[in-house]
Amino acid sequence: MTVLIVDDEDRIRLLIKEYCLNENYIVLEANDGIKALKLIKENKIDVIILDIMMPNMDGLTAYQEIKKFNIPTIILSARNEEYDKLVGFGLGVDDYVTKPFSPKELIARIKAVTKRFNKIDDIYVYQNLKVDFKGHVVYIDNKEIKLTPKEYDLLIYFINNKNIALSREELLSKIWGYDFFGDDRTIDTHIKMLRNNLGKYRDLIQTVRGMGYKFEIKEK
């Protein structure tokens, strides 16, 4: 897999590169949006890590062109304002990570977005929990459980981002849409209902204090 790291800070690119190389990824680098677009046109790239604040061409401006190439993109930025995140999600970016960040979590997010983008499996199974993506049906102990559309969307988003801490803001943006004028209570209420419906698997959805939630799977 080829990863393009776009950031004007050398130390940030080096840090991400080291972790990507440990995963046996091929790494390309650019320090602004103009150079990034040149590399995209010349190479087959599987995922892009894109900073916002850069000289010559900033990340969000570059993404307007990048999205034409249909490459999964993770925004990496020191700008933590809600407006910037909502603009990013509104443009269609696949994920948004703020600095300072955990390189290990960034790798997990890379794997998550590329898996979603290249999703092959039609069925997800964890113990006696089964999700039929094509049939839009969830089973526990071979019995169908009834979920509302939003509960189902939340569960799928959790599964596709398992073991990643997700903020309430991100869940609102991804499930309800970036222009939805809701608040944290919307997420909390739907999480409560989803947990109730998951029964013995309710504890898979863990609360991340002060942030949001995580779908925690201990895989062998």
Image: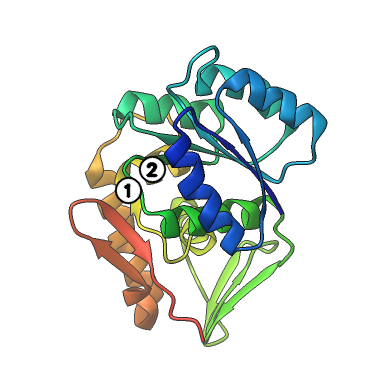
Q: Position of residue 96 (x, y in %)?
A: 44, 39
In the rendered view, tell whether residue 81 sits above or below residue 13.
Answer: above
Q: Is residue 112 visible?
A: no
Q: Position of residue 183 (x, y in %)?
A: 25, 38
Judging depth in this view, the residue of 35 and 190 nearest the camera is 35
| Image-quadrant location for residue 170 | top left
Q: Residue at x 28, y 45 (%)?
A: 186
Image side of residue 74 versus residue 103, left or right: right
Q: Position of residue 141 (x, y in %)?
A: 52, 87
Q: Residue at x 48, y 32 (%)?
A: 89
Callout 1 touching callout 2 (CB < 8 Å): yes
Q: Which mark is residue 170?
A: 2
Q: Residue at x 79, y 27 (%)?
A: 41
Image side of residue 64 versus residue 108, left or right: right
Q: Residue at x 58, y 51 (%)?
A: 113
Q: Which mark is residue 167?
A: 1
Label 2 secondary element: helix
